[in-house]
Amino acid sequence: MGSTTDYFEIATDEGLFRIGDTAPDGTVETDLGANVEVTVESYQQAGDWVDIRLSGGYVLSLPETRVKYILTRDPAAA
């Protein structure tokens, strides 16, 4: 199951990832520990893993046990 939806947010133990928003600080860091600002672009579920795709070609792969929830509809639009 994947996503090309207009809206999604994923809550994990790493923070909240919402399409179009900047990923939480520390998601991507340089070798020297400096934060790299990246934007959340999409996600894909494959088996027991969730891949969160970020700008710059970065992908954060998490086992679904670290995902608290995935919301695919904007609660403000309801």
Image: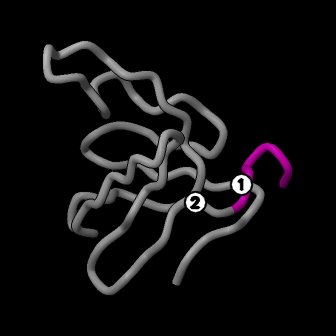
In this rendering, the label closer to the viewer, 1 or 2: 1
Q: Position of residue 31 (x, y in %)?
A: 14, 23
Range drawn in magenta: 73-78
With 16 as the anchor, is 4 left or right in this view? right
Q: Amino acid at mark 2?
A: Leu
Residue linked to disc 1: 7
Q: Secondary structure at mark 2?
A: strand
Q: Amino acid at mark 1?
A: Tyr
Residue 73 versus residue 56 in the image, above or below: below
Q: Secondary structure at mark 1?
A: loop
Residue 76 versus residue 24 in the image, above or below: below
Residue linked to disc 2: 71
Q: Judge the density around disc 1: few (<14), some (14-19), many (≥20) Cα neighbours within 10 Å.
A: some
Foreground: 36 or 49?
36
Q: Position of residue 41 (x, y in %)?
A: 59, 49
Foreground: 69 or 28?
28
- Residue in the picture at 30% in, 32% down: 28
Q: Could you tell me how far apart the alpha carbons at marks 1 and 2 are, in whole angstroms?
A: 8 Å
With 71 as the anchor, is 10 left or right in this view? left
- Residue in the picture at 44% in, 39% down: 16
Q: Quadrant of residue 22?
A: top right
